[in-house]
Amino acid sequence: MNWIVASLVSALFLGVYDLCIKHAIRDNAVLPILFFSTLTGATVWTALLLAQAAHPGLLPASLVTDPLAPVQHLQLLLKSAIVTASWIFTYFGLKHLPLSLGSPIRATTPLWTLFGALLILGERPTALEITGVLITLVSFVGLSMAGRLEGVHFHRDKWVGFLLAGTMLGAVSSLYDKYLLGRAHFSVPTVQAWFSIYLVVLFTPFAIGWKWRWWERNEFRWRWSIPVIALSLLVADYIYFGALRQPGSLVSVVMSLRRGSTLVAFAGGLLLFGERSNWQKILAAIGILAGIAITVMG
């Protein structure tokens, strides 16, 4: 599969991932959904680890994991902890916000990653990156104005705060990925496999607390979309990394095309969940995507 086509297919599955999250969490308990969806992903990787141990050489290189030292397991446990916090904030935010508002907010992750790179890694933005950031920020203000028409006031709505916190933690995870895959020289399947398994470990106490009613909580209803959340993300990431490995692929273009998932989720929110649409929201979403694309390409 050509790397441009692969990037677009990855974007499609990411959009499906967002739609499945919204379908699963509507009027439903969030923590069991997180537990069972991560359990699905961990089950897939556990099966692959067992197949690798039983029949070395059976799996393609893109699915083969490396042996790890205890300190390396702790490094991947830290990644899982960051993502656990990010997903808790994100899922609760998406539960209480229209997907046509929430998905563009989540699309700003590369913007916060850039800010982190500037502050932590000492990188310097190009003129194109600065232009992209400004377009994204202006579009974000436009999205907040569109949200007011639906009774969502960005500056005082706690669920917007939850979604922003989850998005920023997602950016922290991206920066940590850069360290793990770059400086620490972890392979992609090794990170994906153990990160998925440790997610289950970290979500288990939350699932137990929900089960035993340690806090006030909603009732849980099983939905087909719960395991599909994990499966669609696994497919999206696998195709994404495959696109990056192809000769001649441009990471800036791949990442920009992958942001097209926002359009899939945005359209799905309007068509499948009956969310309200207005020209301000549509223009703001397009502006955020354009700003992110310019930022990444810079």
Image (cartoon, rainbow, N blue to C red):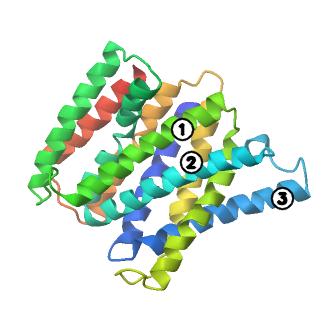
Question: Between marks 3 and 2, how big is the CA–CA gap?
Answer: 25 Å
Along the polypeptide, which appears first: circle 1 or circle 3?
A: 3
Question: Between marks 1 and 2, how big is the CA–CA gap?
Answer: 7 Å
Q: What element carries label 3?
A: helix
Q: For this view, does 198 lie left or right of residue 92?
A: right
The amino acid type found where label 2 is placed reads Lys
Where does label 3 land, which residue?
A: 51
Label 3 or label 2, whichever lies nearer to me, is 2
Say above or below: 295 vs 262. above
For the point 37% across and 77% down, the residue is 28
Q: For this view, does 15 lie left or right of residue 182?
A: left
Nearer-the-camera pick, 273 or 153: 153
Neighbour class for label 2 at 10 Å: few (<14), some, many (≥20)? many
| Position in image of residue 200 (x %, y %) | 60, 65
Along the polypeptide, which appears first: circle 3 or circle 2?
A: 3
Q: Is mark 2 on a helix, strand or loop?
A: helix
Res. 266 visible in picture? no
Where does label 1 land, which residue?
A: 176
Are dots 3 and 2 in contact, CB under 8 Å?
A: no
Are dots 1 and 2 in contact, CB under 8 Å?
A: yes
The amino acid type found where label 1 is placed reads Tyr
| Position in image of residue 225 (x %, y %) | 48, 69
| Position in image of residue 246 (x %, y %) | 65, 29
Res. 76 visible in picture? yes
Where does label 2 land, which residue?
A: 79
Q: Quadrant of the N terminus?
A: top right
The amino acid type found where label 3 is placed reads Ala
